[in-house]
Amino acid sequence: QVQLVESGGGLVQPGGSLRLSCVVSGSIFSINAMGWYRQTPGEQRELVAGITNGGNTNYADSVKGRFTISRDNAKNTMYLQMNSLKPEDTAVYYCNAVVRVRSYSATFNYWGQGTQVTVSS
């Protein structure tokens, strides 16, 4: 069983910062790509930032220059540093990981339960 647990969400004023964390635990052989997604009511879940196991990153245009994704492979942990937050960044943020549980198995997509980020004065 593989679990992803996010933390670090909360209420912050516009212009403020938050750091999200996502810890992957359980029966893991390897973790390939990881990513942060967000979703607001009535909208589709959208990719915020992604990172490969080699450290290559990509970002949604709306967060480029403000958000930084990183990962610590030794700790099976991914981070999202969010600076200069705007009200439109308000959403539930989900972490995603592509995990191989055995050396000979296929990869599977796993999701965390989500953490609320609210940007408001």
Image (tube, grey):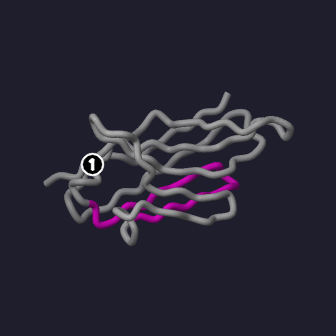
> x and y percent of residue 119 in the render?
23, 52
Q: From the image, which quarter does the C terminus lie in?
A: bottom left
9 to the left or right of 22: left
User: Could you say whether the residue bearing mark 1 is in a helix, strand or loop?
Assistant: loop
Question: Is residue 73 found inside the magenta-colored segment of the image?
Answer: yes
> x and y percent of residue 92 in the render?
35, 41
Q: Give the residue at the far top of this rendering.
A: 1
The rendered magenta stretch, by its main secondary structure, is classed as strand
Asked if residue 107 is positioned above or below residue 56 in the image, the reply reads above
Q: Residue at x 50, y 44 (%)?
A: 95
Which residue is nearer to you in this view: 60 or 103?
60
Q: Which residue is mark 1?
A: 90
Q: From the image, which quarter does the N terminus lie in?
A: top right
> x and y percent of residue 78 in the render?
56, 53
> x and y percent of residue 35 in the render?
53, 51
Q: Residue at x 75, y 46 (%)?
A: 30
Disc 1 marks which amino acid?
Thr
Magenta-colored span: 67-85
Q: Give the residue at the far right of this rendering.
A: 104
